[in-house]
Amino acid sequence: MVESREKVALVTGASSGIGEAIARRLLQRGWRVAMTARREERLVSLVKLLDVAGDRTLTLVGDVTSAADRQRWVQRTYERWGRIDALVNNAGYGQRGPIELVPVEAIRANFETNLFSLVALTQLVIPLMRGRGRGRIINVGSVAGRIARPFSSVYDATKHALNAVSDGLRGELRPFGIDVVVIQPGFITTEFVDAANKVSGEVIRHMGVYSEAWEAMQKSIGTVKRLAGRPDDIADLVERALDARHPRARYSGPKHAKLFLALKWLLPDRLFDRVFRVRRSP
Ligand SMILES: NC(=O)c1ccc[n+]([C@@H]2O[C@H](COP(=O)([O-])OP(=O)(O)OC[C@H]3O[C@@H](n4cnc5c(N)ncnc54)[C@H](OP(=O)(O)O)[C@@H]3O)[C@@H](O)[C@H]2O)c1
């Protein structure tokens, strides 16, 4: 068990990118952190680096889509520290490709990781938080939870759905002292694009009539990449969401994320579509 002022977080997808930055930040702030991911070697060496004494972290290897792994993560965190103050649902990946060509199984798989498994893990943690009358659930969504783009709308749909679930949960859990927050990152330099290209490799290699538009899209993404933020920018947002007495429903960043969200809100669809317009192959 931990001293009552020491807080405990369970962070999924902590082996790289945004999850790693969040875990690092929480440890710097004196939290105890249970870190989950599939890549064991990667997670173990990261934990050794972040927690030399080995008494402030739990290394929980596993797949968020496995019910047994989710159960084990929550159980081990609870057994070790007796509570979970914050659940940071961060594990996720992007599926790319035009809707016509992405196999429905791949669409299901993306929802399985980014939404269904996240909800299932949250369902395990809610009773523990409700028992203490407090807790904070931080869902790492995306600007893509508000804006859907050509060739990315499968992933974008998972994040739109996460926004809906988070809005519902926020109202359901407020009477029990549990806050629900969505973090909406814009482009952040991580392994996300490589992972998305890897999982979407088969679709990308067979773009057919979409090839030209896809290539044009890649070029414009190259431009936006120059605006990309760092994982620490998102750790800043999570820190704010956890420190706030009354957290906001959503935190967005870096600056370009706020700009895109404002444009989406301000512009009629026909005008906003031009931001991500693609050319058609002849
Ligand atoms: N980078 C961006 O521009 C951006 C923008 C908006 C939102 N986001 C969101 O931020 C979150 C983190 O992404 P990132 O950018 O940090 O990408 P990343 O570097 O690829 O990290 C993804 C993390 O999720 C874990 N993960 C993926 N699938 C998993 C599974 N089935 N089971 C367990 N862990 C799994 C990965 O660990 P293992 O591979 O070791 O399992 C890794 O730790 C995602 O939800 C993503 O949608 C990213």
Image: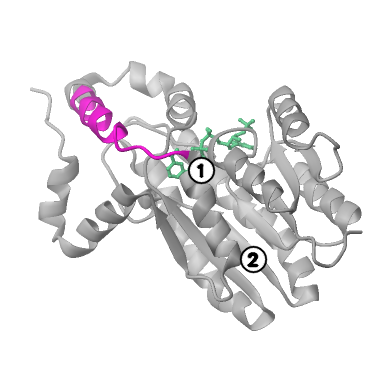
Q: Quadrant of residue 171?
A: bottom right
Kindly identify the residue that appears in the image at 16 percent across and 48 percent down.
Answer: 273
Q: Earlier in the sequence, mark 2 or mark 1?
A: 2
90 over 136 or under it: above or below: above
Is residue 91 something one can see in this rendering? Answer: no
Number of other residues with Cα within 10 Å of mark 2, as a class: few under 14, some 14 to 19, many 20 or more: many
Kindly identify which residue carries mark 2. 136
**Which residues make up the magenta segment?**
214-230
Helix, strand or loop at mark 1 = helix
Kindly identify which residue carries mark 1. 232
In the rendered image, residue 124 lying in the magenta stretch gets the answer no
Q: Position of residue 24 (x, y in %)?
A: 65, 42
Is residue 28 something one can see in this rendering? Answer: yes
Ligand 1 quarter of the rendering? top right
Q: Position of residue 178 (x, y in %)?
A: 65, 73
Q: Main secondary structure of the magenta part?
A: helix
Q: Quadrant of residue 218?
A: top left
Three-letter amino acid code at disc 2?
Answer: Arg
Disc 2 from disc 1: Cα separation: 20 Å
Number of other residues with Cα within 10 Å of mark 1, as a class: few under 14, some 14 to 19, many 20 or more: some
Q: Quadrant of residue 121?
A: bottom right
